[in-house]
Amino acid sequence: MMFRRVGFLLLSPSILMAVAGCNGGLTVTPFVGTVVQMTIAGAGITAAGTHLEVWTRDQYDDIIRVDASFSFPDPKDKSKTNTIYTQGLQIRNAITFDDPCMIDGKGNLLTSPAAYTTRTVGGNTETPEEQAQTVKNRIAQVTATAIGGKEPSTVLAVTPYDETPVPVIDPMASAKDRLAACEAYWNVSPLAYTPNPAQLTAPLHGAAYGFVAYTTTSPPAGYDGVRLDSPTHLKGAQDFWLSLENVAVKDVKPNNQGPIFLEGKPTPGGNDVIHFDLTGPSASGTATLLVNLDDNSVVF
């Protein structure tokens, strides 16, 4: 059995034009890789020191470790975008009340009146205290009663695995000191995670690939689905599974994987997709692989 990561050839515009001159037409390939859409239900937080890995087995019996792309603004030039390719996933609380880096641009906690000034919207005046309370109310809608929320449990995010420890910051620290500590945390890794109470799908820092299936009661709302944009072509996948690993991402071995977390065989799907129903010891889910996006060519 063999492990491989499939590579791709990108053609420059000049080469494409040369090809067009030879055959009388220009064919543009819109996407090379695979979009993996997953749902996960019944899963809990991955324990410290563990993470999930995503795998497939292709028609040649090769085991492929599935990676994902993540793009973010260049920290030195916000007009540019950097892209990294991540391996490994973790499940964590999507948000809590006490995240030390959930701050504004000056270092004030978004749950504190210090982050706001009095404003008037639609004829209604909102004090800093009222705006801070609005943020707290929003967090309470998706967090467990055990930590001050209003739900039986807290919404869980599926994020790229990252070992950067969240800083421990004195609650009485000045905004300047808090900002410095959080910037140091964010500078360690582009994946260092800080939630955004205004939009959970767009963290203040790091990435959220999706959420474990979750429904709120008041107001009714649902969170579900995980999306991985993988540069790896997974056409021909005959198996799809997630393993639970207790070694560093760099030390994961295809021939020495951890226990199965979820697994499944292909089931009938739509055009150009491979669908899997996933089951595991403590969770369930689905996976849909959009594998033929590069075959739907557009000819000019």
Image (spheres, grey):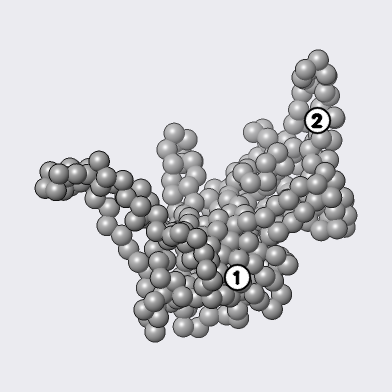
Report the residue marked by disc 2.
131
Quarter placement of the N terminus: bottom left
Residue at image coords 64%, 67%: 285
Evaluate if marks 2 and 1 touch, with contact meaning CB atoms under 8 Å apart: no
Residue at image coords 24%, 50%: 11
Residue at image coords 76%, 47%: 221
Quarter placement of the C terminus: top left
Q: Quadrant of residue 209?
A: bottom right
**295 over 204 or under it: above or below:** below
Q: Nearer the viewer, residue 263 or 73?
A: 263
Mark 2 vs mark 1, CA separation in Å? 43 Å
Number of dots carrying numbers: 2
Q: Give percent across and percent down for residue 150.
A: 87, 50
SS label for mark 2: helix
Q: Give percent across and percent down for residue 67.
A: 47, 63
Mark 1 surroundings: few (<14), some (14-19) or many (≥20) residues within 10 A: some
Mark 2 surroundings: few (<14), some (14-19) or many (≥20) residues within 10 A: many
Q: Nearer the viewer, residue 299 or 71?
A: 299
Mark 2 or mark 1, whichever is nearer to me: 1
Given the current orientation, which residue lies at the most extreme left position? Answer: 22
Q: Give percent across and percent down for residue 182.
A: 64, 45
Report the residue marked by disc 1.
277
Q: Earlier in the sequence, mark 2 or mark 1?
A: 2
The amino acid beneath tag 2 is Gln
Q: Give percent across and percent down for residue 35.
A: 48, 57
The amino acid beneath tag 1 is Asp
**122 over 224 or under it: above or below:** above
Given the current orientation, which residue lies at the most extreme top position? Answer: 123
Residue at image coords 11%, 48%: 22
Q: Is residue 161 visible?
A: no
Q: Is residue 19 visible?
A: yes
**179 over 185 or under it: above or below:** above
